[in-house]
Amino acid sequence: MSAGDGSKVLPPAAREGEGAVNTAKKKQENASTGASAATIRALSARMFAFYFRAPVKAFFRARVDYMGYARAINPRIQAGEPWSYRQLSPFILAHAIRTHGWSFIPNQVLPPLLANTAVGAVLYTTYLNTLGLMHEPSSRATKRVYPPPPLETAFKAGFVAGTVQSLLAAPLDALQVRFQAKEMMEGRWGNMWQYAHAKTKEIGARGVFAGWTLSFVRDSIGFGAFFAAFEFVKGQCFYSFVSNVYGFYDKLSLFQKTKILGQEATPGRPEIKPHYMLEPTFILMAGAAASIAQSVVQHPITRIQDVHYGRLEWIDSHRPPQAQPPSATEPKPAATAPPKRNAFSMYASAYRKTFKECAALARRSGGLRAWLYKDFLVGTLRQVPSTSAGLIAFEVIRRKYAMDEEVVRIHKDGYDILLV
């Protein structure tokens, strides 16, 4: 038996049991995959929070901090005590429940959790459907996509998904930026539901989408890089590795060679399977690569966005109050220019002032790159574990709804590499 040619170009694959899949069924399966994976991602991130002192960022930066108010009312944190196990999320939440009762969870914790999960579900579902439209093999309800989507196709699908997410998350960004625990502690808002409703009504659509341009750039390009890196390592790198390592007969292990020789008497082509831990390892590496690629894009933009949101807060606090309508006995005031134009001009000029402020901060920090990527390594390392765990959950759920009879065969000289 001769060895394979060892070419890096993946050979064509033959699929078993391939057939047409109903369009409505595919959409339903993709939607279920996105929602289920988002829920599992949120739960896995909460488990990893036990190992970190700050909330873990999983697939995306949490739009609303679900433990923000609980930390604000915790005496240990407010006193600035050295870190201890009592500052972990479960103990902080337990103190909040003892202080405010079990209603604290549905009133203060559940709203941001639901908001973050909804954003994640929209992101995954949009990505799966968009990728299926751009890459036909990805639209099939199969365990494994072969051939894998090209790098640029995954980037485009991630770009679209990030754009849709940025639109949905704009109100959450506006609420998170304007949230002040002091107002909640003073009783101005009874719970997060009331705060979200009243604050959204107060700032209006203009306030909700102020600063959305930066969110659009951050999310669209960031998630484009995220999914492109994930699909490239998980798909193209994995298949290339398997094809080259297991595609040379002389390089196979003695067990694999014996298995091939033992199948020569049976009809059909001999088959070998790669080590079962090989693909999970590539998924872990894909999660790490995706997290790093996303951080390279999003970390500097987030730094600029934090400065810009601070300016928007200042604009909101210095806006003149809306004039009350005059009573019947008071003379009608003279007509004045509507304040909306002034407010719009302030929002529009906020970008220019933000970039000037960022340039000044960069000069004091030793350069623009040093300021933009400050704390980049720490933030990225904190994000990698939960991102990899979340992506594994994403793959498990996606494959649960796949067609079990689908397999991938990579043809080599005299035998097949079987991926099931």
Image (cartoon, rainbow, N blue to C red):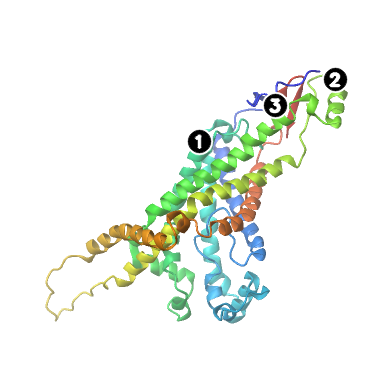
User: What is the C-alpha distance between the residues marked 2 and 3?
Assistant: 18 Å
Amino acid type shown at disc 1:
Glu
Closer to us: 370 or 352: 370
Work out whether residue 67 can be spotted. Answer: yes
The quarter of the rendered structure image containing the N terminus is: top right
Above or below residue 38? Residue 266 is above
Q: CA distance from mark 1 to mark 2?
A: 42 Å
Kindly report the distance in space between the C-alpha atoms of the residues bearing marks 3 and 1: 24 Å
Q: Tell me which numbered mark, 1 or 2, is placed earlier along the sequence.
A: 1
Q: Amino acid at mark 2?
A: Glu
Asked if residue 41 lies left or right of residue 304, the reply is right
Look at label 3 and name its amino acid: Ile
What residue does disc 3 label?
410
Between disc 3 and disc 1, whose residue precedes? 1
Disc 2 + disc 3, Cβ < 8 Å = no
Residue 133 x %, y %:
50, 35
Which residue in the structure is indicated by mark 2?
264
How far across and down, in percent of the image, does residue 349 sit? 28, 59
Residue displayed at 33% across by 59% down: 356
Q: Secondary structure at mark 1?
A: helix
The answer to whether any part of residue 208 appears in the image is: no
In the rendered image, residue 329, in percent from the top left (x then y), is placed at: 14, 81
User: How many residues crowd mark 1 within 10 Å: few (<14), some (14–19), many (20+)?
Assistant: few
Circle 1 residue: 152
Residue at point 78%, 18% (across, down): 2
Please report the residue visible at 77 percent of the width from the left and 32 percent of the height from the top.
273
Q: Is residue 412 above or below residue 294?
A: above
